[in-house]
Amino acid sequence: MKRIFEKFSIHLILLSVSILSIFPFIWLISTSLKGNSENIFAYPPTIIPQNFTWANYVGVWHKVDFIGYFINSMIVAGGTVLLNLILSSMAGYPLARMEFKGKKFAFFSILSTIMIPFQVIMLPVYLVTLKLHLVDSVSNTAGFIGLIMPFAVSAFGIFLMRQAFLGIPKEMEEAAIIDGCSVWQLFWKVLIPMVKPSLAVLAIFTFIGSWGEFLWPSIVLTKESMYTLPVGVNNLQGMFSSNWRFIAAGSILSTIPILIFFLAMQRYFISGENEGAVKG
């Protein structure tokens, strides 16, 4: 009886925490579906709209270049994910499998950069971006490169891929070398297919981070046609005199690609997280 009570208490606590965690998202959906006659700041808040309408979504879709913002975000997020997968894998492999002088120092130096917030290095990165003319005032291509390159590789990605490569038995490498594989063939054709779950985890985290990035694009971008979704949605606040129904609708629309991407990669997520665990 005591054990049943303990399990019930634990599940009740977890359920309560879950409801508290998702309540802002539920309130956002509710706000986006409410008509102009409803008070969205009523207390206590009303979750179920009394005047259910899709007009807010239609209004946002037609009154701003939502498709343009979406395409810009897809280009930036897609490029960032692709470069992270390639560069993190290429950096994690030698740290896991090769022996060279200063290997531990290099690894811990890379790992230590996780403690440095991007805001600390943002000014020098911005100056470098300007010096290299990687801004949208030069060309749209240069603007996209300027948005992608500061996040093209991460210490977390290198660490995750290193741990994934460490989990592969060395016998697999030895068998491939005996069969005549070069280092590049071993890396691309043997090891990379074996760490797909970890690549999926890295892709998910990188995509979410890049898709939701607001600070860097808002500083670098100067042309509205180059805005990504977070910057474009934030622009709704001034464009519609803080029409929170439109802002809520725009925010919900901007989260749909993240949900789709996560669901598409979900089957790899749990196994990839386990492979990224610290091994002794």
Image (spheres, rainbow, N blue to C red):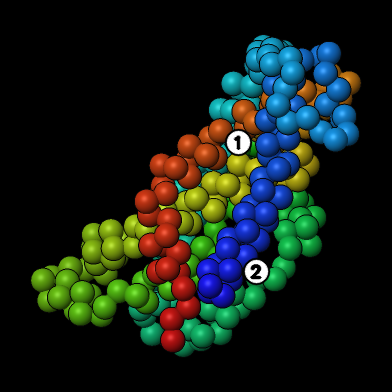
Q: Which mark is residue 114?
A: 2
Mark 2 and mark 1 lie on one chain; the one further toward the N terminus is 2
Three-letter residue code for mark 2: Ile
**Which class describes the residues within 10 Å of circle 1: few (<14), some (14-19), or many (20+)?**
some
Q: Secondary structure at mark 1?
A: helix
Of badges 2 and 1, the one in the foreground is 1
Asked whether the residues under the numbered discs 2 and 1 touch, taking CB atoms below 8 Å apart as contact, a structural biologist would say no
Residue 269: x %, y % from top left = 43, 56
Instruction: Give the residue drawn at x 15%, y 75%.
Output: 175
Q: Which residue is mark 1?
A: 255
Q: Which mark is residue 210?
A: none
When asked about the image quadrant of residue 100, the answer is bottom left
Instruction: Give the residue drawn at x 87%, y 30%.
Output: 41
**Which class describes the residues within 10 Å of circle 2: few (<14), some (14-19), or many (20+)?**
few
Q: Is residue 255 above or below residue 190?
A: above
Q: Which is more toward the observer, 248 or 211?
A: 248
For residue 165, say whether it is visible: yes
Residue 253: x %, y % from top left = 62, 28
Instruction: Give the residue drawn at x 34%, y 75%.
Output: 167
Q: Is residue 250 above or below residue 265?
A: above
Q: Which is more toward the observer, 22 or 44?
A: 44
For residue 223, say whether it is visible: no
Three-letter residue code for mark 1: Thr
CA gap between label 2 and label 1 equals 26 Å
When asked about the image quadrant of residue 23, the answer is top right
Residue 111: x %, y % from top left = 59, 74
> Which quadrant is the C terminus positioned in?
bottom left
Residue reaching furthest to the front: 1
When asked about the image quadrant of residue 66, the answer is top right
Q: How many marks?
A: 2
Q: Secondary structure at mark 2?
A: helix
